[in-house]
Structure formats: structure tokens, C-alpha cells
Image (cartoon, grey):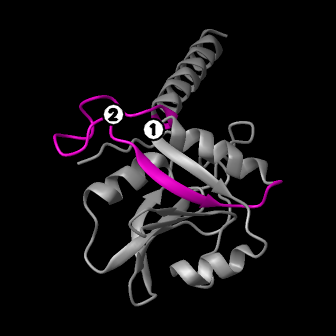
Amino acid sequence: MHWFKKLLFIIATLSCASYVAAQEFMSPLSENTLGNSVGKSDTVVLDVYKSPSCQCCSKWIHHVEAFNFEAETHHPDNITLVKERVGVPKGYYACHTSVTKDGRVFEGHIPAKLIRRYLMKQPKDTIGLTVKGMPLGSPGMNVGGRFSPYKIYLIHKNGSVSEYEDVKLFTQQYDIE
């Protein structure tokens, strides 16, 4: 029976550590995380295009606002036209589209830390990031602690995509380099 108590202790410890790490993943950036060029007080404005009834999009908006993004929400009659206009490749659509004032595009439930990283070091000849669909466990898609690995893709100016980040763990950390 002694081994069983040890196993329960290990499971409880891992569960607690996972919860703490998940909270860090979903929590706002610290003052020093962004480096000298961008500080915690720098606000980035995102025009977010979504359906008025989509609650997961609203949860994602709360997530990015915790990272000092300002979200201006729009409810277009045809969101597909918005996606086409800003350059989201077909096959990479998600439930909402966000655009910065200078035209950078962020499609779907992308973690705010990855958006901030992209904006700090914009890869040449790209317009933004996309995540296909609505991955379970991504910001705004938190459902009972469940998680499915997913990929974040770069959107290139020529309409192609390439992998930007492979999110394998709910607790994966995103330090801005």
C-alpha cells in the first residue's frame, strides 16, 4: 500500500505543477519579458472581426486584453470577405480575425505571447499568424482542462504558410526572445 500513497503524491504534485505552469502560460507578461524595445505599458490595438454570438472569441479577447492588447470588436455581415481582404489563406480560417492598425493579421485562437513575439520580430515577407480551427486548450477554448496539440503558422505575403510554433503542451511556456 506504501507504493500507492507515493503514486498518489506524485500525481497530485504533477497536477499542481501543471496548473501553476498553465496559469503562467495564460497570465500577462512580466515587465522585463519584452525587452527594451517594447514594454508592458505598450498597447497594441487589434481590430477583431467575429460573430456577435461567439463566446470563445469573447474569451480570447479577454485573454489578449490581459496582455495589454486593446481589442476593438466588429461584427461583419460576412466574415469570410474580411478574411479574404486581409489575406488569410483558404484552409486556414478560424472563428475570428484580428488585424493591427498597420495590417498585421492574426487568425484564430493564437496565444497573446506569440502575437507579441511576432510583432517584436516580424519575419520577412509575412503578414501575420494563423491557427486552423478552434484547438482545444488554446486561449478561449479552455474546456475542462482538456488539450489537443496544435500548430501556429506564419502567413507569407505570397499566400503560402509555414510552421511558426508547434504547441504540444497546455503548459508550454512562451518567453519572448
Q: Secondary structure at mark 1?
A: loop
Please tell me whether mark 2 sits on a helix, a strand or a loop: loop
Q: In the figure, is residue 6 to the left or right of 51?
A: left
- Part of the protein shown in magenta: 25-53
Spot occupied by residue 40 in the image (x, y as percentages of width and height): 32, 34
The residue at the point 42 percent across, 55 percent down is 115
Q: Nearer the viewer, residue 162 or 37?
A: 37
Q: Residue 49 appears in which quarter of the rendering?
A: bottom right
The residue that disc 2 covers is 41
* Left/right of residue 143 with respect to residue 5 in the rendered view: right
Eyeballing the image, is 147 above or below 8? below
Count residues near mark 2 (Cα–Cα under 10 Å), then give few for <14, some for 14-19, many for 20+.
few
Q: Could you tell me residue 149's position as x and y percent?
A: 57, 57
Extreme right residue here?
53
The foreground one among 86 and 4 is 86
User: Could you tell whether 37 is left or right of 166 in the image?
Assistant: left
Q: Quick check: is 45 in the magenta stretch? A: yes
- Is 168 a magenta residue? no
124 shown above or below 15:
below
Mark 1 surroundings within 10 Å by alpha-carbon count, few (fewer than 14), some (14 through 19), many (20 or more): many
Q: Main secondary structure of the magenta part?
A: loop
Residue ID for mark 1 = 67
Residue 39 placement (x, y as % from top left):
27, 37
**Quadrant that contains the N terminus:** top right
* Residue 87: image location, x then y, percent: 51, 82
Residue situated in front as seen by the camera: 109 or 1: 109
Can you tell which quarter of the image residue 150 is in?
bottom right
> Tag 2: residue type?
Ser
